[in-house]
Amino acid sequence: MARHGSAKPSTAVRIRSRPHLNLLKTLEITFLGTGTSQGVPIIACQCDVCQSSNLKDKRLRTSVLVQMNGKNIVIDSGPDFRYQMLRCGINKLNALLLTHSHKDHIAGLDDIRAFNYIQKTAIDVYLEQATLDAVKREFYYIFEENKYPGVPEINTHLIENKEFLCASIPITPIRVMHYRMPVLGFRIGDFSYITDANFIAQVEKEKIYGSKVLVLNALRKSNHISHFSLDEALQLAAELKIPKTYLIHVSHQLGLHDEVSLALPSGVMLAYDTLKVTL
């Protein structure tokens, strides 16, 4: 919703005023992974978090499943993509959205070939040109003229920082900065998703206002060159005034899930793997 005194209506208001959004039904979010690029526990680490027996301290690489109108959309396919699909029993994939080209967000792309086989169709992948360039380098065999049998089949859809349709669902990109790297977050209905960021310009924040749920990265307690710290994420959540904010892309340096959760303000929660949220 636009803030009082704002000179322009927010993008969120413009989106919700469009008739096609009235067709959207219940939106369910499943956190497939909530960890940082190395996951938690980290290999060979002996810290309390990595040695914890609490399942909420076991974090696969960050990814989320959005289910709406009978469609399954996954945001980012990191190295744990195969296991995430198996763990959550996902038998259908309508589309994949990629936020940026870092390995912990694209490395599992090869495993969509299982969906190719089951669904007998290529999978739609939505991404920016810079991300497509990286995908072509990393998965060159997908794009060869004479393909080896059984390689992944994808339909690439180039997106820019403007609304697009994905599986007939309107999606609004949100431009954020990951140090000097442009990254996309996404707003789907009343759900806004931001990973791998430490700066959001005011014009992009306008797209988030009015959301009911915000997912936001909070790497650790101390400052980081390319991710929001816990305090920075909390300050942004308070500024945006979203009713519920879930923190993701969490490293072992943030601390034990239960201890961190106790210290969070009302309306802010530490997400964990397999958590489901319904709007």
Image (spheres, rainbow, N blue to C red):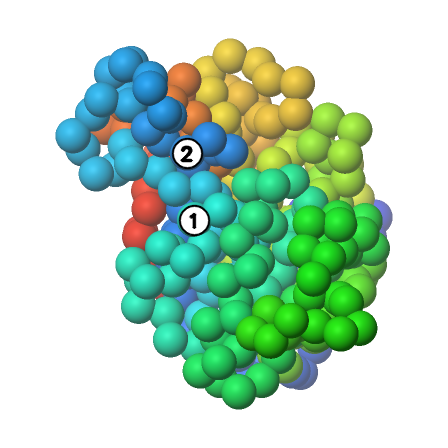
Residue 97 x, y percent position in the rendering? 62, 61
> Would you say the residues marked 2 and 1 are in contact, meaning their CB atoms lie under 8 Å apart?
yes
- How many neighbours does mark 2 have within 10 angstroms: few (below 14), some (14-19), or many (20 or more)? many
Q: Which amino acid, mark 1?
A: Asp
Residue at 50 percent of width and 62 percent of height: 111
Residue at 40 percent of width and 17 percent of height: 253
Which residue is tagged 2?
39
Residue nearest the observer in this picture, 88 or 195 = 88
As drawn, 106 above or below 114 = above
As drawn, 52 above or below 273 = above
Residue 103 x, y percent position in the rendering? 60, 41
Residue 42 x, y percent position in the rendering? 37, 25
Q: Quadrant of the C terminus?
A: bottom left
Is residue 114 in view from this perspective? yes
Question: Any mark on residue 80, and which?
Answer: 1
7 left or right, relative to 236: right
As drawn, 13 above or below 94 = above
Residue at 38 percent of width and 62 percent of height: 85
